Amino acid sequence: MPFVTITVKTGKDATYLNRLSKIIHTAMQETISFPADVYFHKIHELKKENMLYLSEFRNLKRSHDMLFIECTIKSGRSAEKKQLMYERISNDLNTKLGIRKEDIMIVIRENNAEDWYLHPPVQD
């Protein structure tokens, strides 16, 4: 059961943020597999001065549209599935919202079933 935090700079409208979330959700669901009724996203909008990163990292230039995606998921997915997820999210965000791949950072945090609370208890 993924829990996703999306961090963007302020200024995007609700339609954009909803599309962003849905694109990420669909890509995750189709690559790392989880039940269709699981959808928990949190969007953080930060002022420009509160979203800090280097404008150049490993010879890639970042823009003012940098996007951070943190995915908390239960452990057990293969490295291959995770790589497919990264690739799918970045490709879909690029083609559907015009977000440069250089401006996307995705981090997975893994944990176990006992690290989650949801009533009724999570079964997957």
Image (cartoon, helix red, strand yellow):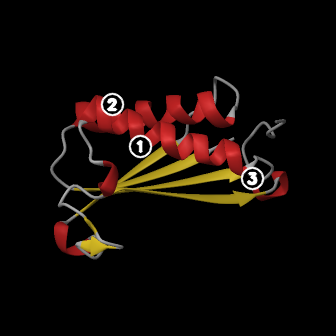
Horizontal relation, residue 17 to residue 89: left or right:
left
Label 3: which secondary element? loop
Residue behind mark 1: 90
Vertical side of 61 occupied by 79: above or below: above
Q: Nearer the viewer, residue 115 or 75?
A: 75
* Residue closest to the far front: 59
Residue behind mark 2: 19
Q: Name the spot of residue 95 as percent of width and height, x first.
A: 30, 31
Q: Name the spot of residue 54 as percent of width and height, x first.
A: 27, 76
What residue sits 82% from the left and 51% below the top?
113
Residue behind mark 3: 116
What residue sits 30% from the left and 56% below the top?
103
Classify mark 3: residues with Cα within 10 Å, few (<14), some (14-19) or many (20+). few
Q: Nearer the viewer, residue 42 or 88?
A: 88
Q: Quadrant of residue 102?
A: bottom left
Amino acid beneath label 3: Trp
Label 2: which secondary element? helix
Task: Mark 1 and mark 3 in contact? Answer it, CB < 8 Å.
Answer: no
What residue sits 40% from the left and 37% below the top?
91
Amino acid beneath label 2: Arg
Classify mark 1: residues with Cα within 10 Å, few (<14), some (14-19) or many (20+). many
